[in-house]
Amino acid sequence: MPIALAGSIGYMINGWGAENTPDYSVGYVFFPAVVLISIVSYFTAPVGARLAHKLPVATLKKVFAALLVFLSLKMLQTIFTS
């Protein structure tokens, strides 16, 4: 929570005078997205916690590794296609 709060404040301060930001945003923080992400997280966090307690550690590690590989490939794709 402290890291997320510090990061959010940093994005608000750094983007304070930015042009072409959408309505309902402060700096680079778009508050409708904050509200929607918070609502979805409120309902899905207990599901994730239950899954984390039910699944074996090896399975969780493999799923997390697959997620990291997917995200790194997606990042590489954006680098090479732009």
Image (cartoon, rainbow, N blue to C red):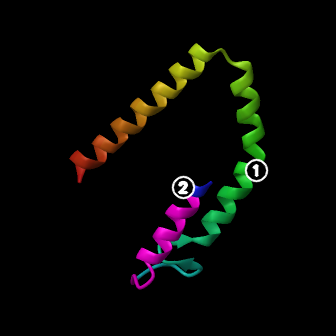
| Left or right position of 21 against 25 | left
Specify the label residue 42 is tagged with. 1
Q: Relative to the observer, which residue lies in front, 81 or 1?
A: 1
- In this figure, which residue is indicated by the disc labeled 2? 3
Give the spatial CA distance, label 2 vs label 1: 19 Å
Q: Which residues are magenta?
A: 4-19
Residue 29: image location, x then y, percent: 53, 70
Residue 21: image location, x then y, percent: 46, 79
- The count of marks equals 2
Q: Taking 46 as reference, is 25 above or below it?
A: below
Q: In terms of secondary structure, where does tag 1 sit?
A: helix
Q: Is disc 2 in contact with disc 1, using a CB cutoff of under 8 Å? A: no
Q: Taking 71 as reference, is 27 above or below it?
A: below
Q: Which residue is located at x 70 percent, y 49 percent?
A: 41
| Magenta stretch prevailing secondary structure | helix
- Figure quadrant of residue 59: top right
Q: Which residue is located at x 41 percent, y 82 percent?
A: 20
Q: Which residue is located at x 43 percent, y 33 percent?
A: 68
> From this viewpoint, which residue is outermost toward the front?
2
